[in-house]
Image: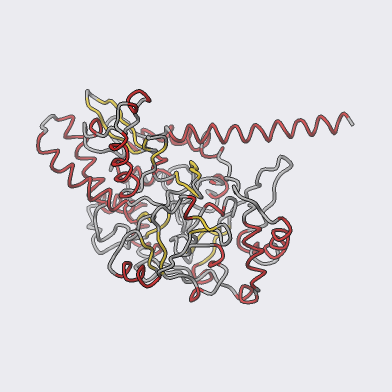
Amino acid sequence: MKLIFVLFFSLHLFSQSKKDLSIKAQKDFLNLHFFENGRGMTISPNISKYLSMFRLTNDDLKKIPRWKKSIYKKILEDRYGLNVLDDQVAGLFNVKYKNMDVGVLGCVACHGGKAAGQFVAGLGNKIVDVYKIGVDAKRIQSTWGRFHNNPDFKEIHKVAMNFSNVISDSSISNLTRGLIPDSVIKTYFYKEAGVDYKGQISRAQVKVPHLWGLKEKRKTGIFWGAEFNGDEIGWEFGAELFASDSAEHFKAVLPKLRSSVKNIVYKFQAPEYPFEVDEKLAAQGKKIFNTSCFKCHGVHNRGLDGYPIYHQPKFIPVRVSKTDDDRLKDFDRYIGLVQSSSVSDILKLNIRKEMGYVAPNLWGIWSRFPYLHNASVPTLDALMREPQKRPQVFSMFDAGEKYRFDQKKIGLTLPKRRKQMLAKAKAGDRNIYYTKREGHSNSGHYYKFMAQFTENDIKSLVEYMKTL
């Protein structure tokens, strides 16, 4: 009896420890950035001191009129898709450097987002609009730079302009908010090799990936396509590399990157579903999942401590998944550029006979909508159905807020006035996801066994996935 009590007590402490470690890791992640010696994801010096919501103290915030706060929120959240938490911009920092105020973008700006109104560090930002940020930053910074001749200013200003110039390039940037273009990372290798990337690379638009379970995912490969080898921590820094445009910066902060991944990211736990679950229906769904979906995604079990057991995800060729292949294009030439680059000793590639995608673990899947790598399917319910029956249009505006969450179908609420939304989508509205846009196809991820699903099967599968 004593042994059972000791075992139970030990498991309870271990469980609490994992929870505490995850909470601490998320707090630490909120403060993580990689600015070093003038390099990093920056905006032009001294602009940040005029942005009153850049990491202000509570006393500072009290001095800002309520009407002014609402304007900041309108611009920062509604226009740019940055998360404002307690009147602070998540992932934006004001760093003092050589008597200048340097605005720095941190990890959580993109790798932090909301689901059903709950903010989760490590969840992809569902509403960010990289292109809009780039366009406005380029316009403001180019004007700002004309009035400064200080060499230190010019050095950082050049880095900041490079960042905004690339993400505002309409030929390679995202077409819809909530998507980020992997193409911008590729530009670093083209530019370093002196090769013009114009017309050479696709947009490669994807949603920002979640970060829990990364330790096992790295064994298959980094990013959605698993083409980037995860044996050495480095590709996790891909966006920062292109932004700073410097191999020296990359190598200088690599120790911090390794430490951050090990001591912060690896501690993340998937968020629990915040609403009620029909346990009986979920049990039916688990049986269906474990005789069908597990073939790609694996069986999902929990340890004695109650926390998820992560496993190395499978690589699925695109000829099998049949999902949008836009991000897999132009890879042959890219391989050579990476292998001959100044960071080839750190960044390796997975060379496979065919391209494809990672079939990820599904822990926290309720929060990871819209679904597929390119965010083309708004709900889990729709993902179980034939592609031609999936919605062609849906809104990404306020995608993480509670009022936009569909508790029955799990994902985004759908438009009541579909024709009006379709018209806006065809006119290029960036708040609306339209599956006919480049790289936005909602095809694939539909297999023979799924054709046999009844309405109750789909309902029970969705209910089971709430428990993951």
Res 150 quadrant in image: top left
Task: Count the numbered circles shown.
Answer: 0
Q: Is residue 63 visible?
A: yes
Nearer-the-camera pick, 373 or 249: 373
| Residue in view at x 48 percent, y 32 percent | 28
| Residue in view at x 66 percent, y 47 percent | 309
Position of 188 compared to 229: left or right?
left
Relative height, residue 399 to residue 427 (above, below): above
| Residue in view at x 36 percent, y 67 percent | 421
Nearer-the-camera pick, 176 or 374: 176
Res 270 quadrant in image: top right
Position of 451 compared to 375: left or right?
right
Instruction: State the image coordinates of residue 238 (x, y, percent, origin top left).
Output: 38, 46
Instruction: State the image coordinates of residue 13 (x, y, percent, origin top left).
Output: 70, 30
Nearer-the-camera pick, 75 or 232: 75
- Image quadrant where one finds the N terminus: top right
Snapshot colouring: secondary structure
Instruction: State the image coordinates of residue 418 (x, y, percent, origin top left).
Output: 40, 70
Relative height, residue 260 to residue 321 (above, below): above
Q: Is residue 182 visible?
A: no
Position of 406 compared to 65: left or right?
right
Nearer-the-camera pick, 319 or 322: 322
Instruction: State the image coordinates of residue 8 (x, y, percent, origin top left).
Output: 79, 34
